[in-house]
Image (cartoon, rainbow, N blue to C red):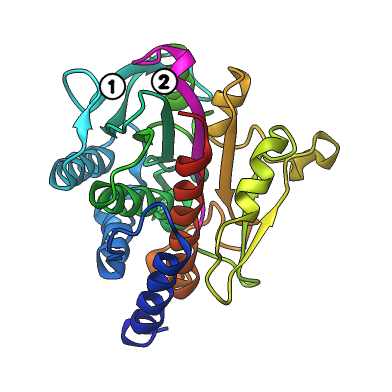
Amino acid sequence: MNQSFFLPRFLAGALCICSLSLTSCAQQVYEPSQILKDVEILAADSLEGRLPNTPGHGKAQQYLLQRFQSIGLKPVGTQYQHAFTFTPRNSSISQPGVNLVGMIPGKSEKVIVVSAHYDHVGIRNGKVYNGADDDASGIGAILALATQFQKQKPQHTLVFVAFDAEEQGLQGSNAFVANLPFAKERVLLNVNLDMVSISEKNELYAAGTYHHPALKPLLEQVKVPQGLHLRLGHDRPEQGPNDWTLQSDHGSFHRAQIPFIYFGVEDHPHYHQETDEFRNIHQAFYLKAVETIQRAVEVLDQQLPL
Ligand SMILES: [Zn+2]
């Protein structure tokens, strides 16, 4: 779908939220072109599939540092980069990893961590696995949310994290949770985004309410743009591989007894394939998904305890 078609609809949808939200009605200026540009840049061949400790991954990191800075996020500690070490799958040699962490201070010191992962699986058999959906889409979304919450200051302190080495076994989030840069008691919730841009059925899932039923009525209040279906689920142990509780970085928070909501789509033919490219994301769906997630974070921010 071409951009000039969906842009007016998207903006029209964005305006609706102002009439619905009584507590905060800052101007809602989405930047669809910036969101798509972020995904296109992160999923470019020149970034070589963003495998940790490769030149392409370094370029992704530099790009995100520049975006954090231009959005005006504050570092947590002295810098955005939070270094750690991890042992990759199929190896016994440890490697350095770098999570990128920036925040928007709220009226409350209580923290909502909004996350996505910027690494992917690199080059295989000479082919670049670009990871446009997985998870450049999540990163594009958290940058859009950060931009928006700079304009409509949140109640809670929002901490935006681009995790490293998710594909190596949730390594960046494990390290982050094991060594939180603030007291654990301050962390109310992790909202994690991984694969939010491809769905034939226009379905975006929010997983986690099985574990945290108190969050269900909050998510049910989210005004969803027309044409997108927000489903709750994929979080029950009896669902086996369809239980997504531990399948992305929110799993690290869950293991540490920190509540989570995970936004994602069901697996699709491009999942972990060389075809997970920018040209294959569903742009109209993706922009509606970003809008939905932003509205969800607004509801959570307004209604979770301060
Ligand atoms: Zn992923």
Residue 85 located left or right of residue 56: right
**14 or 274, nearer to the observer:** 14
The residue that appears at 46% across and 70% down in the rendered structure is: 280
Q: Mark 1 highlights which residue?
A: 82
At which x and y percent is residue 88? 47, 23
* Residues shaded magenta: 179-196
Q: Is-magenta flag for residue 183?
A: yes
- Other-residue count near label 1 (Cα within 10 Å), few / some / many at <14 / 14–19 / ≥20: many
Where is residue 114, by image quadrant?
top left
Q: Quadrant of residue 306?
A: top left
State the residue lying farthest toward the front: 22
Q: Mark 1 near mark 2, Cβ–Cβ under 8 Å?
A: yes
What residue is rendered at 20% in x and 41% in y? Answer: 68
- SS at circle 1: strand
How far from the left and from the top, in percent, is residue 18? 39, 66
The disc label shown at residue 159, or none = none
Q: Is residue 267 magenta?
A: no
- Image position of 227 with respect to 52: above or below: below
Q: Which residue is mark 2?
A: 176
Above or below: residue 155 compared with residue 108: below
Kind of residue indicated by mark 1: His
x and y, in percent, of residue 242 in the image: 75, 45
User: Viewer-proximal residue, 276 or 282?
Assistant: 282
Q: Residue at x 42, y 55 (%)?
A: 137
